[in-house]
Amino acid sequence: MKKCPKCGAQMSSDTNFCTECGADLRNVPVSNESAQTTETFEPNGTVENQNQQQANQNTQQTTQAQPTQQAQQPAQAQPVRRSIDTEQAKQTAASYWKWLLGSWAHPTNTEAPTSKWFGVVSIAIEIFLFCASFFTMVQKAVAYLNQQANNVSNGLAALLGQQQNNSNLIHFNSFGTSFEIFIVLLLLDAAVLGAVYGINCWVFREKESFFDFINRFAHYTNVILITNLLFFLFSLMSAYTMMALVLILSIFLYVLGMTMVIVTRQGSQRLDRLYGAVFVAIIILIALGILCAICGTAVDIAFKSLTGGLGN
């Protein structure tokens, strides 16, 4: 290579004049620096190979890191979404209704429901309808007694020449009392079912699932849903005689269902089914005694409210 003495440009060894500035290069000596450089680095290629390997490693690391970052970013950016599966809810409701109709048509032909909660739902609805009927009945009774009390009070005021005043003399929280009765009945029913389930496990050697037991009992007694609905309708019409008859029918169906859940079960027995049914009857009698005591307490509260209101 030749180096131009005027502009410093590098020219090939066979160039006579500088292509940059036109200077005469015929007397400029040829430099062996490029050849030495080539001879120094090109034969072994150690530096270039190391640089090339380092560049390849950096490229691979960058390529591997990019998919990882791209995979992490969507996972961090996606929000958590929770939605109710309406289609599944419709299918469950349709299955419950089909199971309910089957139990009404053939109460003794028990069939396994698609959900273990169907029996629990039926029992909760039965208790709710009963408490709604009680709430309606108490509201009507309190309104009637207030009307009669106002009639008596206004009659006395007219005789004494005083000003007549219509007001609610009787104050009774029918909603709060109905809600309390709903909770008490729910707990009492749960206690009875738990006790009868214990007898069921004691009588038979093979243990039955609690939810299977509840579903069998509900299948026998789902007719109570109809009787409790009639009980509610009669409470709206103030047909107290019909309400009493329907209530007696509901209690009979309940006792019958409790007995059948023991008597109709198949399997190896530790004790005869008849004795199991006797124990169930004793438990139901105790529960009815507790229920009567609760109803007596509610009537006593209503009576005290009545006498207190009239006393004022």
Image (tube, rainbow, N blue to C red):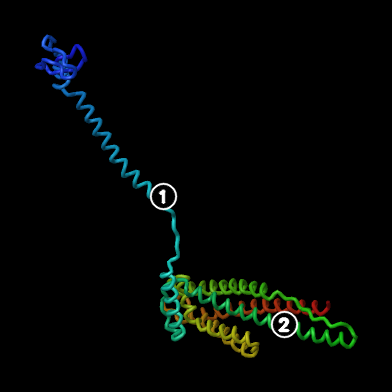
Residue 87 pos. (x, y %) = 41, 70
Residue 268 pos. (x, y %) = 41, 76
Rendered residue at 25%/30% (across/down): 54
Rendered residue at 22%/30% (across/down): 53
Report the amino acid beneath label 1: Ala
Closer to the camera in the image, 177 or 119: 177
Q: Could you tell me which quadrant the C terminus lies in?
A: bottom right
Closer to the camera in the image, 191 or 166: 166
Label of residue 77 in the image: 1
Tell me if I can see residue 302 in this picture. yes
How far apart, in angstroms, are the residues tagged by discs 1 and 2?
61 Å
Q: In the figure, is residue 306 to the left or right of 115?
A: right
Q: Residue furthest toward the front?
A: 22
Dots 1 and 2: beta carbons under 8 Å? Answer: no
Q: Residue furthest toward the bottom?
A: 241
Dot 1 alpha-carbon crowd within 10 angstroms: few under 14, some 14 to 19, many 20 or more: few
Rendered residue at 20%/26% (across/down): 48
Report the amino acid beneath label 2: Ala
Tell me if I can see residue 272 in this picture. no
Label 1 vs 2, first from the N-terminus: 1
Residue 256 pos. (x, y %) = 52, 84
Secondary element at tag 2: helix
Question: What residue sits right under mark 2 in the picture?
Answer: 143
Secondary element at tag 1: helix
Relative vertical location of residue 297 with respect to residue 49 in this rendering, above or below: below
Q: In the figure, is residue 2 to the left or right of 203?
A: left
Q: Could you tell me which quadrant the N terminus lies in?
A: top left
Relative vertical location of residue 34 with respect to residue 159 in this rendering, above or below: above
Closer to the camera in the image, 303 or 268: 303
